[in-house]
Image (cartoon, rainbow, N blue to C red):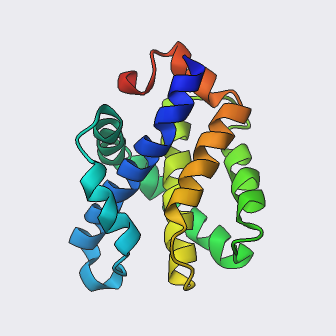
């Protein structure tokens, strides 16, 4: 159901962020700052939601490459803070879905959430990942994306 998808979304996002972070540390090493909040996620892994997050991080490689530079530029020019982050998040997230919903755009949304969490963390504001996970879940529920995912058979069918 739609509610179940919304509930699982935060876990899927946190797991996705963990695996993206692992990939980036392997590729770029010390350039990627150590984020204790992401490292903590490791204890939650093993559930269905986290397996889905991992798979999306792996299959999302091409999508991330396509969007990542653009996301970085946007974030640099917007300078999100705790106070305006949700507004910026929804504005950019909405633009991703202007021409409809598909799995590629859902993965791009997770990628944007991850990039925003890392950006804010690098500005010296820790503890932002859970907040972004909540933003992602709220956005998906409000914009009927959770309903679309439920109609496709839920996160496990991604």
Quarter assignment of residue 40 = bottom left
Image x and y of residue 154, in percent: 45, 21
- Tally the numbered discs: 0
* Residue 100 horizontal/vertical position (percent): 67, 29
The residue shown at (73%, 44%) is 94
If the image is split into quadrants, where does the C terminus sit?
top left
Measured along the vertical axis of the image, is residue 4 above or below residue 21? above
70 with respect to 142 (left or right): left
Depicted 42 relative to depicted 154: above or below: below
Instruction: Tell me residue 25's x, y (percent).
Output: 27, 72
Residue 69, x across and y down, in percent = 52, 67
Please name whichever residue, 63 or 44, is drawn nearer the observer in this view of the structure: 44
Residue drawn at point x = 57 percent, y = 75 percent: 120
Front residue of 18/63: it is 18
Q: Would you identify the image quadrant in which residue 46 lies?
A: top left
Quadrant into which the N terminus falls: top right
- Residue drawn at (76%, 53%) of the image: 91
Is 134 on the left-hand or right-hand side of 60? Answer: right
**Any part of residue 104 in sight:** no
Residue 145 versus residue 50: which sits nearer the camera? 50
- On the question of residue 62 being in view, the answer is yes
Q: Quadrant of residue 101?
A: top right
Residue at the spot 67% in from the left edge and 42% down from the top edge: 139
Relative to 17, is 92 on the left or the right? right
Q: Is residue 3 above or below residue 78?
A: above
């Amino acid at each position: 159901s739609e509610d179940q998808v919304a509930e699982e979304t935060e876990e899927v996002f946190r797991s996705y962020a963990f695996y993206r972070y692992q990939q980036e540390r392997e590729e770029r090493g010390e350039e990627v700052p150590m984020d204790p909040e992401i490292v903590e996620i490791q204890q939650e892994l093993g559930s269905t939601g986290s397996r889905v997050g991992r798979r999306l991080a792996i299959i999302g490689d091409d999508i991330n490459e396509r969007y990542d530079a653009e996301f970085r530029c946007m974030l640099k020019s917007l300078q999100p803070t705790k106070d305006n982050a949700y507004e910026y998040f929804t504005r950019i997230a909405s633009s991703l879905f202007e021409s409809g919903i598909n799995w590629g755009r859902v993965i791009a949304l997770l990628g944007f959430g991850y990039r925003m969490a890392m950006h804010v963390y690098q500005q010296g504001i820790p503890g932002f990942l859970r907040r972004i996970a909540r933003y992602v879940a709220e956005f998906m529920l409000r914009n009927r994306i959770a309903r679309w995912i439920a109609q496709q058979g839920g996160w496990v069918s991604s």
